[in-house]
Image (tube, rainbow, N blue to C red):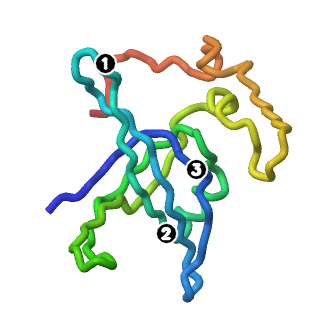
Amino acid sequence: MLNNVVLMGRLTADPELKHTPNGIAVTRFTLAVGRSYSKAGTERATDFIDIVAWRSTAEFVSKYFNKGQLVAVRGAIQTGSYQDKDGNNRRTFEVVADNVFFAESKKDSSYNNSYDRQGTNEKSVDIDNSSSFETGNMDDFREIPTDDDLPF
């Protein structure tokens, strides 16, 4: 069987770290994921997908990610069911995150967050792109010899 999900979207709120009674770290958050298609004459729809992360992944997410930030999530779909207060059967759907990744550079994400994690209005972005590929500087790369004696 195969149950593998890869999503990219924006966080709808700051992830909040919680702990189970046994001390296991957990965080739940929602990703706003734009659909890749739209009906003629309408705007593209957005799906809001619930994600849960456990242990070190939960700690990582709650420490480094904020509302509005573009993130990529790799995980698996988990479903469940319950009865609501009126006795109706309900189903739940969420993605259990194995890994959560930064999907944009710090420079690109800084405009999305008007407040840092402590709630102040100050932002400190210290990015040195002087020798990065993004600025077109090729000094970070070395040329690979093109001889015919390849190891494969």
Q: Residue furthest left?
A: 1
Q: For numbered disc 1, what is the local secondary structure?
A: loop
Q: Amino acid at mark 2?
A: Trp
Image vertical order of residue 127 relative to residue 69, above or below: above
Point 59% across, 77% down: residue: 19
Q: For numbered disc 3, what is the local secondary structure?
A: loop
**Disc 2 or disc 1, which is closer to the eye?**
2
Q: Are marks 1 and 3 in contact (CB under 8 Å)?
A: no
Point 73% across, 36% down: residue: 114
User: Which quadrant of the view contains residue 20?
Assistant: bottom right
- Estimate how packed mark 2 is, as few (under 14), some (14 to 19) or many (20 or more) residues with alpha carbons within 10 Å: many
Q: Residue 75's x, y, as percent?
A: 36, 56
Point 39% across, 39% down: residue: 33
- Estimate how packed mark 3 is, as few (under 14), some (14 to 19) or many (20 or more) residues with alpha carbons within 10 Å: some
Quadrant showing the C terminus: top left
Residue 13's disc is 3
Q: Earlier in the sequence, mark 1 or mark 3?
A: 3
Q: Earlier in the sequence, mark 2 or mark 1?
A: 2
Q: Are marks 2 and 1 in contact (CB under 8 Å)?
A: no
